[in-house]
Amino acid sequence: MPQKSSKPRYIFITGGVVSSLGKGLASASIAVLLQARGYKVRLRKLDPYLNVDPGTMSPFQHGEVYVTEDGGETDLDLGHYERFTGVEARKSDNVTTGRIYSNLIMKERRGDYLGGTVQVIPHVTDLIKEFIQSDAGGADFVLCEIGGTVGDIEGQPFLEAIRQIGYKLGKDRALYVHLTLVPYLAAAKELKTKPTQHSVKELRTIGLQPNILLCRSERAIPKSDRQKIALFCNVSEDDVFEARDAETIYEVPLSYHKQGVDEQILKHFELPVAKDVPLKNWQNIVSKIAKTTKVTHVAIVGKYTGLKDAYKSLIEAVYHAGIANDTQVELHWVDARLQDIKKLKDVQGIIVPGGFGEEGVAGKLAAARFARENNIPYLGICFGMQMAVLEAARNLAGIKDASSTEFGPTPNPVVGLMTEWVKEGSKEKRSSKGDLGGTMRLGSYPCVIKKGTLAYEVYGSTKIEERHRHRYEVNANYIPQLEKTGMVFSGMSPDGKLPEIVEIPEHPWFVGVQFHPEFKSTIFNPHPLFSGFVGAAKKVKL
């Protein structure tokens, strides 16, 4: 049995040299290894940008906004955390500089600082430390990823805060992991350790000495280079590890374990190091991935296709469903703004994901129509469901001016801003004049499914809960007209006012959902909607 403690131990993960090294995957992989050894983990992300949360940030810049069960709009790394560990993320697991300063100014205006001069140290750092150490939920380990790159001016208060926590708690309750880059220079035909040395030097100038180094590299790092890194970075050679590029991200926990990352972490905390670690499920899934040879072609028709991270959870959910159906899924990216429908002739399934704004609407409507008329399996998510409904309203129900109030005033608002709904027995309201960050239906909501429908077949239940992130709803007043065309509203909110799932029974597989099922899919528990969609798509002959 692992040695438990009433007080959590903290592991801080920082990154150096360049961004996008994979701190989120590193954090999630370490958490998996600690879980496998019987410890309870909690993962957190500290983002240095000044936005209060990523909710109003452009997907073109920031990538996906991940939504938690309790309605938090968070960084996409929380998706990695959930998909790897199965630990449900909360609003309280992600904070930004904007949120910290917003709370700080509010406290100052209330007079909480009694007229004193408010400064970065101690006031900002105290709020950061309060966030890190609160609401740990009985975890044995709290893993905190610091966003950005060491040396960024925005990240300095966060680094100072975790230095102070380590200083106060001591070695037996704090550990620092630094993810860095060891690039290969093709012209010189050698790996270069100098960027790592400088990155660690930058950390040490602010009082942070990493305990473990994870060195990202596209090839093996020789022992001599690891010795050099250890010497110049003031760490043991046993604490310098490769973070090699992998065929699949789900190999990363196994790679870390094989090298002994989890063993070194436990040794640091003077905890027992059991040799028998139950990772068979990870080994089996990686083996299954390697053996899968069949390919299914799926198109994603969206407007953020220039940055694949904008659809990170969607990509992973489709990947999970492919593994469950013994097929690789090859994604074909179709920019909805270009209306390049010709590309859809070479795919077996079409997904129209969520999005905001009128840009790309014509392409998404055309994709929904192409799927409907050509019997191609279709999965419309959030905005993608609304497009399927609008397409049917215009081309099947004869409502030629059917539109969404998101695009402007319309005589036939088949999609519109719902101003009131019920959640957990109480009314929630929103206004078109409210802040963009405050007009969403966010987080988990219940849905009641009709028996005898495809949705019921997929879920095997009449009651489900799924995560939402949207402002506009399909107008229930138009359901009678739409159902005359053959479209069935198979899922509704418990009060019957908000359409949640639509489908076309005469079609091989055509489903639209108002929620975001991709947020609840994991490699070991693929979401049934994606599994059903990929299962139908792989049967289509090209």
Image (cartoon, rainbow, N blue to C red):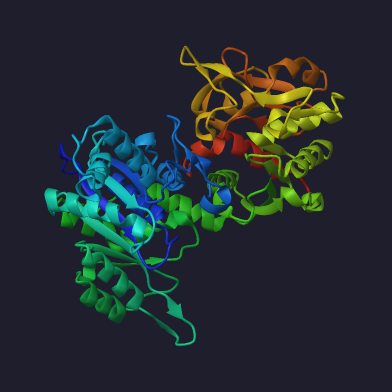
Q: Is residue 71 left or right of residue 504?
A: left
Q: Is residue 104 left or right of residue 58?
A: left
* Location of residue 350 (image quadrant): top right
For the residue pair 304 and 538, the one nearer the viewer reads as 304
Q: Is residue 453 left or right of residue 65?
A: right
Q: Residue lying farthest front?
A: 115
Residue 273 in sight here: no
* Residue 141: % across, % down: 24, 44
Residue 304 in sight here: yes
* Residue 371: % across, % down: 78, 39
Residue for point 28% across, 68% down = 202
* Location of residue 243 (image quadrant): bottom left
Q: Is residue 315 above or below residue 505?
A: below
Residue for point 18% across, 34% down = 114
* Residue 224: % across, % down: 28, 81
Q: Is residue 171 left or right of residue 36?
A: left
* Location of residue 220 (image quadrant): bottom left
Figure quadrant of the N terminus: top left
Q: Is residue 290 above or below residue 323?
A: below
For the residue pair 370 and 114, the one nearer the viewer reads as 114
Q: In the rendered picture of this protein, how many numbered marks are placed on residues?
A: 0
* Residue 151: % across, % down: 33, 64
For the residue pair 290 and 139, the one nearer the viewer reads as 139
Residue for point 43% across, 57% down = 251
